[in-house]
């Protein structure tokens, strides 16, 4: 099928894009990578009256460390992270995560911010942003809003972004040398949507876990923080016994999605597996 008719705009500055969003509101859709929007338009599941193509806005194409955060602009493609963009555990984690996102053509066009704006529950970047406690920058003609990842995800494909706002960047906290991170997901074929995934970040000092974060994706309407499971790890020495305890707690901290791919109990079993695998990878790095 072909998309329904729409007006097309290609602004050259963030200000011009925001002015268009202010004018058109819910009738306008932003195009960056287009890996989700274009197929839904082709099937006429999405029928925007106005398409705002931001690909010519060079000011939104950046990925740089600044102080204690890594700033990632709206036009930073997935492929940018295939080699570490920063030294240390954050760069290694992002490189590990991105290799699980779809296939090379999609990674060459799709963007991290686009993925966060789309808010697919099976998105690797959504789970990573929530786990790390990222901050998202939503801009409009009235100014900027800083939104924590915990407040960003509201439901399936639903975020805190308003119709007149543009997600201009995401800020990921830089992780010090004491942090160790791991990622694991399960899908039926490489590149398919994940049926379950886990992102973990551990701060280890003197052989003891001082802080822990565990995020789950692909199992509910939004990514999930398994806070109780992470709390079990604090004060413990890394090892299979505590990994199993945390994985078991993670598997019971949410109400799993049921669909044609997995029953709720199957998803719980998958969470047990991916959490343990991610924890093992974290301490192996």
Image (cartoon, rainbow, N blue to C red):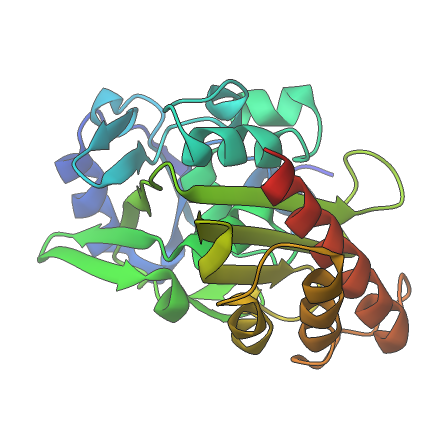
| Quadrant containing the N terminus in the rendered view | top right
Q: Is residue 118 visible?
A: no
Q: Is residue 154 visible?
A: yes
Identify the residue shown where x is 40% and y is 29%: 88
Image quarter of residue 217: bottom right
Identify the residue shown where x is 75% and y is 76%: 256
- Relative to the observer, which residue lies in front, 54 or 100? 100
Residue 19 coordinates in the image, percent (x, y): 16, 46
Compared to residue 244, the image places residue 255 above or below, namely: below
Identify the residue shown where x is 91% and y is 65%: 260
Compared to residue 156, the image places residue 76 above or below, namely: above
The image shows a total of numbered marks equal to 0
Compared to residue 72, the image places residue 195 above or below, namely: below
Residue 283 coordinates in the image, percent (x, y): 60, 42
Image quarter of residue 246: bottom right
Residue 160 coordinates in the image, percent (x, y): 36, 67
Classify residue 37 as left or right of residue 192. left
């Amino acid at each position: 099928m072909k998309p329904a008719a729409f007006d097309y705009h290609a602004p050259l500055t963030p200000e011009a894009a925001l002015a268009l969003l202010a004018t058109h509101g819910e009738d306008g859709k932003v195009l960056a990578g287009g890996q989700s929007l274009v197929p839904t338009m082709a099937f006429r599941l999405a029928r925007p009256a106005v398409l705002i193509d931001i690909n010519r806005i060079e000011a939104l194409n950046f990925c740089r460390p600044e102080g204690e955060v890594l700033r990632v602009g709206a036009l930073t493609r997935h492929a940018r992270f295939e080699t570490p963009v920063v030294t240390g555990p954050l760069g290694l984690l992002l490189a590990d995560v991105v290799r699980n996102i779809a296939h090379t053509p999609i990674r060459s066009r799709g963007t991290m911010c686009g993925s966060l704006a789309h808010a697919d529950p099976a998105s690797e970047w959504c789970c990573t942003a929530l786990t790390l406690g990222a901050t998202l920058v939503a801009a409009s003609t009235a100014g900027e809003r800083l939104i924590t990842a915990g407040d960003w995800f509201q439901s399936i494909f639903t975020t805190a972004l308003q119709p007149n706002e543009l997600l201009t960047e995401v800020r990921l906290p830089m992780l010090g040398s004491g942090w160790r991170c791991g990622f694991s997901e399960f899908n039926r074929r490489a590149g398919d949507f994940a049926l379950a995934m886990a992102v973990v970040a551990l701060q280890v000092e003197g052989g003891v876990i001082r802080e822990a974060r565990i995020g789950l994706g692909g199992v509910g309407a939004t990514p999930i923080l398994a806070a109780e499971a992470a709390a079990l790890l604090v004060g413990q020495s890394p090892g299979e016994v505590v990994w199993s305890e945390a994985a078991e707690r993670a598997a019971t901290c949410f109400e799993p999605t049921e669909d044609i791919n997995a029953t709720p109990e199957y998803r719980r079993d998958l969470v047990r597996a991916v959490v343990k695998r991610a924890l093992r990878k974290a301490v192996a790095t």
